[in-house]
Every structure is written in C-alpha cells, then in structure tokens.
Amino acid sequence: MWGLLMSPRRGTAEPVGLAALLHLLRPYRGLVAGAVTLVIAASVLGLAQPVLAGRIIDRVRTSEPIAGLVLTLAALFVAQTLIDTAGRYLLERSGESVVLGIRRLLVQRLIRLHLPVLHTHRTGDLISRATGDTQALRDGITRSLVEIAVGALTVAGATVLMVAIDPVLFLVVLGVFAVAALGVAIVLESIRQAAEQSRTAVGVLTADLERSLSAIRTIRIHRAEQVETDRLLASAEAAFAAGIRGARLAAVAQPAIQLAASGSFLLVLVVGGMRVASGNLQLGDLIAVLLYATYLVMPLGNLLEGLTTLKRAMGALQRVQEALDLPTESDESAPSAITATVPGAPALAFADVRFSYDDRPALSGVSFELARGSRTALVGASGSGKSTILSLICRFYEPTNGTITYLGHDAAALTRAQCRQLVSLVEQSAPVLHGTIRENLCMGRPSDAADMDRVLRQVNLHDWVETLPDGVDTQVGEHGSQLSGGERQRLAIARALLTRPAVLLLDEPTSNLDAENEKTVMDGLRRLHEDCVTVLIVAHRLSTVRDADHILVVDDGEVVAAGSHHELVHTSEHYRLLLGSQITDDDHTDFSGVQK
C-alpha cells in the first residue's frame, strides 16, 4: 500500500518527485477520481451558465418566453453548488486519509528508531515531520493538484468561449467579489473554531510523541513499544476526526466563495440585460463575456496558489520520506520468553566486550560476571564507560566485539525483546511519563492490584499512595512534575520491579535523594535478595558501594579492579584514588567529581 514510501533505503539527498506525491493517492484512487470528476462537472456546469444568461437576455429583448431557461439556469446553479460541495468534501476526506496513513507509518517507525539515530536528530524536528509536514502534504493533495487541474480546465474553457463571443472583449476583465465575502461570513466563525480544534488535536499528538521519544529508553527496556504506539495512533485518530470536521466546513466555504461571486455578478447582469432589452443599455454580448471573466479570474488565482502549495507539499514529502528512511530496530512484537537457563551460568556475563561510538573507543575488552542474586556496584570516574556497559546490557547498542550472555544464553542468539524481558533499568533521571501512577507502573507489564501493592510496599510508597485522593489513578503531571524527586525515583524503581527482572540495573538510584529517602530506597534494595534478583548498580556514594557484595572498578573502558569494598581499599590504588580522603562513616560521601 505504501510501497514507494517504504522502499529500500535511498539516499536522503535524493529528491522526491511528483510521482511520489501521486503515489500517495493510489490507495484512494477511486475516491479521488470520483471527487475530481464531480469538481470538473461542477466547473462545466458553471461554464454553461453565462450562455444561458445571454439567451435569457436575448429572449427578453424579443419578448419570447424565458421561464424554461430561467428554471434551467437555476437548476444548473443549484446542481453546481451541490456537486462541487460533494466533490471537495471527498477530496478533503481523501487528504485526511492519506495523512492518517502516513502518520501511522511515522509513529510506528519513530518509536522504534535506533537510539544512535535519535541522538543525532532533534526530537522536535522528528515530531514536526509527523505533524506539520503531514498537514502540508494534505494541503498539497487536496488543494494544489486539484486546483491546478480544475483551474487550468476552467481557464481554457472560459478563454475559448470569450474569444468566440468577441476577441476584443476578451481583454476586458472586471470582477466584483464583495458579495463573495458576504456569502462565507456565516461560516467564518465555525471555520475558525474547527481549525482551532484541529490544531489542538495535532498539538496533543505532538505532545504524546515528544513524551514517548523523551523516555524512549524506559519504553524500550519495559518492552512498551506497542503500548506507546497504540496511544499515539489513538491521538492520530483524534486528529483525523478533527480534520474531517474542518473538511465539512471547508467543503462548503470554498464553493461559496466562488459561487457567491459568480452568482451575485450573474444576477446583476441578468437585471442589466433586461434594461438592455428595454433600450436603456447596449452591448448585450458584454454580459456573457464578463461572466466568463468572473470564471477566469478565480481559477487563475487558484492556479498560482496551487503551484505554491504544491512546492510546499513536495518539501514536506521530502522530509517525511527522510524520516521513514531512518533505520529502526527490527520488529519483535511477540518474542518468545526465555524459560530455560544454563545450569551454573551467571545471571549476566561480559567476555572481552569492546565498543566504540563511531571512531571513539568506549570499552576495551571488558569482562565480568554477575552471580545470580548478587548485588554488584559499578564505580568509576565520569566517562569511564559505566553508562555504556548499561546500554549494552539493555541492547540499546551492539558490541563491536566480544560476547554478552544472559542466564548462559548468548545475546547474539536472542532478540532484543528477549534480552529486555530479563533486565530492567532505572535511569538516573528516573523518567516519569505524563499520566497516572497506575499507567507508569504498568507500562511494561499489565499488573493486578496485588502486584502493584507489593512493589509499592517494597519502595515504601504504599502508605503515601493511600493518602492520595485518587490513589494509583492520581495524575503525576508532565514528566512527573506533581511528584517530589524522591517519589519519582521510588516510582521508577517500583516500575522496574513490577516486571520481575532477572537483572535489575540501577544508574545512581540515590543521587537525587535526601538521607531519609536514600535509606528507604536502600532498605528496599536489600530486600531484593528475597526475590533472588541480581542487581547491578552504578554508584558514587560510599554507603551504596560499601553494601554491595561485589564491586567493579572501571577506568578508561576497562575493568581495572574487582572485589569487595574492604578488599579494594587495601589492594586497588585506583579505588583508593576514587575514594580519596572520603573513606569515612559518612553515608553520603560522594566521589562522583573525582577525575581520572
């Protein structure tokens, strides 16, 4: 259906042509053909009206009956109005349908883009491609192409008829459009309201897409891509419905602008023709010519506007195509769960893992194992490679060399989704998405009240939630703005625990907490031994490091020391340098600022 847009990757510098724009209409070619036929038929009916008006005037001058011609003229006028309205509504609906289809593609791809791609593209720009650019495409499809075709036909027809009547009068162009403005005044306020509703609906879609992309790591690790995709598609459907409401009014307004001008001018000419027949006015042929001039001026303006809109639409299509060409993670919508484990295998293991960001080495032969049910601290100066290790575990990136195993299974033999079923990540920023506490907890795994109650008690949030008016259905605000830093941190940990991971990854889980909240979180983490959860925690505070069963010291992309806190204090000079003179009983000692 969308073969051209979804073709194998092309260079983004390759410009799209008019054929690509026309290709968008292929799924709706029957509807579009019918709509164009109706609009052209309406234009033909319009071209016939001046001829009838001239005949009416001639019969008035010769005192012949005019009732039949008047009725025919009125019938043509009404038929033109109805046919043009129906045709333009069908065109607007076709355009909205095309936009919905493109937005479906963009949403499904943007939510699955490779993280390196997201890091090199501005989120707002990607959002604008799914909103503003697709809207420009709709304008190009429903206005420019049709207005160019219909306008050209009308101009050609009016020109031929004007020249046939009188070549000299062909040069005369008069227009009266004041009545046209009055003809649409009734619907102007409704059009404004409909346009505002449409912009609001598109704004909601933009906000939802920004919400998802800004927390893409959290969504990926909780395997909530489809949940977020469904939410975004619902927003796209709402924008589609708002656009259809505006299309109904636009379908009335555009013909009203054209027909009110030509109809009012037609009435003036008919009355003036009667005066010509009575001998008070000459140049009866001028009536028909001026009527055709009315039909000529508007199409010329529409042609110019259509060409401008077409250029904008082609630019929008180029940007949409470039977004659709961006590489994504493979579709793993229904992965099979890993049920078997290799006896005696560690929960997680790195074997000579190497990784580079482009040409910049980040890890150089990292090897370690995490025993099942253990708690391991990962320490090192800023830029030493800690965050890269977490990203590789989550399969946000793939190692350049080496092997990563989960419960004894080689990551190369597993899908990303299978690996992410085994791990859960709590980022340092602890992203909380707009919505309710329940929605944030269950984004990675639908859960019942008992499960939510369990994890809330584990992080000491249960009593707090009970005091809220709406309980777990309380809104948390944009990015969790209605929560304190400690509440956001603990909610993120509860969300990770709810997925029952084999390996829990914590990136500075207490860095933004005060002493009381840090104690609460750490007490909850200590109780994870009861569930045999393996914990890997990036930490700087001495209290967190000292409680770990095992410590890995990372420097310049390598594990330079490993052991318990007591062992490393006595055996690792690098570990002592990290701690410096901060080896005290102060639980809040922080050596994050120590340089390598």
Image (cartoon, rainbow, N blue to C red):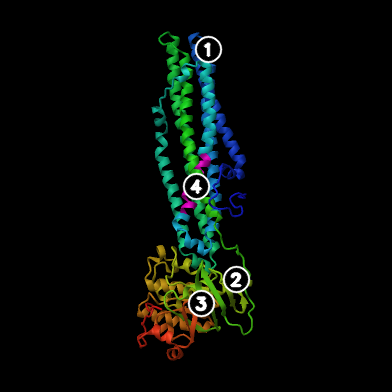
Judge whether 24 appears above or below 414 on screen. above
Q: Position of residue 223 (x, y in %)?
A: 55, 67
Q: Which residue is mark 1?
A: 65
- Secondary structure at numbered mark 4: helix
Name the amino acid, label 4: Ala
Q: Which residues are magenta?
A: 127-142
Nearer-N-terminus badge (1/4): 1
Question: Contact (CB < 8 A) between labels 4 and 3?
Answer: no
| Label 3 crowd bin: few (<14), some (14–19), many (20+), radius 10 Å | many
Name the amino acid, label 1: Pro
Query: Residues under labels 2 and 3: Cα distance?
Result: 15 Å
- Residue 95 is marked as none
| Label 2 crowd bin: few (<14), some (14–19), many (20+), radius 10 Å | some
Nearer-N-terminus badge (2/3): 2
Is residue 132 inside the magenta stretch?
A: yes
Query: Residues under labels 1 and 2: Cα distance?
Result: 85 Å
Q: Which residue is mark 3?
A: 504
Query: Residues under labels 1 and 4: Cα distance?
Result: 57 Å
In-front residue for pair 273/376: 376
Q: Which residue is mark 4?
A: 316
Name the amino acid, label 3: Leu
Quadrant of res 343: bottom right
Query: Residues under labels 2 and 4: Cα distance?
Result: 37 Å
Q: Which residue is mark 2?
A: 418
Q: Which one is in front in this view, the residue at disc 4 or the one at disc 3?
A: 4
Name the amino acid, label 2: Gln
Query: Does residue 28 appear in this view?
Result: yes
